[in-house]
Amino acid sequence: MNRKVFQLLVDNTAGVLSRISGLFSRRGYNIESITAGITSDERYTRITIVTSGDDEILDQIEKQVAKLVDVRNIKELAPDNSVYRELVLIKVKAGNEDRQGIIAVADIFRAKIVDVAPDSLIIELTGNQSKIDAFISLLAGYEILEIARTGIAGLGRGTETVTYL
């Protein structure tokens, strides 16, 4: 199974995300991660989709998505020529005896403590998936209460990958 990251520029209209995810659902394609947000031009939304399958399925996904009316542009974000980031919020149980150890691990990864409660901490970390996975594995000695991951957002490097509409 191969994995690809697709970046879509779509019209910023009601139901566009539903139509795109519906295509994946109808065809039985897998979405590992999907993120969406408005661009600098309010008429368009940038959607980043991480999906997996064999080469034939991935090519089919790209062609089927490109046919959707709202889709203005689709391109693969190749790992060598792109920057990917993900945000994670992690709530960790932290009594007085654990707090300093958790903060030390967070400092190593340049994570931020964004909330402190008497019995827990919420940590924010941004980075690539391997950095986030490594951070979570180092927290395995502590009780992780909740995790919220955003999924991948990405852009191609340089100006030659910019799409002008």
Image: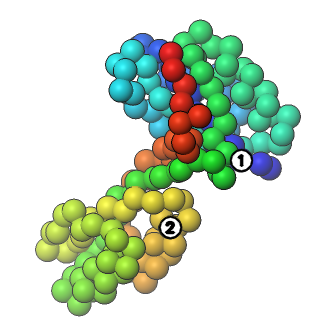
x%, y% of residue 123? 30, 66
View extreme (bottom): residue: 97
* Residue 31 in view, yes or no: no
Q: Is residue 135 left or right of residue 22?
A: left
What residue is drawn where x is 46% and y is 71%?
136
Residue flagged by tag 1: what amino acid is it? Arg
Q: Residue 88 is drawn in which quadrant?
A: bottom left
Report helix, strand or loop for mark 2.
helix
> Looking at the rendered structure, which numbered label has been put on residue 131?
2
* Rendered image quadrant of residue 112: bottom left
Outermost residue toward the front?
Answer: 159
Which one is nearer the viewer's eye here, 55 or 165?
165
| Crowd band around label 1 with a 10 angstrom C-alpha radius: few (<14), some (14–19), many (20+) | few
Q: Quadrant of residue 52 in the image?
A: top right
Q: Amino acid at mark 2?
A: Lys
Residue 87 position within the rendered picture, expressed as x and y whole percent measured from the top left: 40, 54
* Vertical order, 156 against 79 (above or below): above
Question: Is residue 150 at least partly visible in the picture?
Answer: yes
Mark 1 element type: strand
Q: Earlier in the sequence, mark 1 or mark 2?
A: 1
Vertical position of residue 152 compared to residue 134: above or below? above
**Residue under label 1:** 3
Residue furthest top in the image: 69
The answer to which of 25 and 74 lies nearer the viewer is 74
Q: Is residue 29 above or below residue 137?
A: above
Q: CA distance from mark 1 to mark 2?
A: 18 Å
**Residue placed furthest toward the right:** 56
Question: Residue at the spot x=72%, y=27% of the render?
Answer: 62
Q: Residue at x 58, y 47 (%)?
A: 82
Q: Is residue 108 left or right of residue 74?
A: left
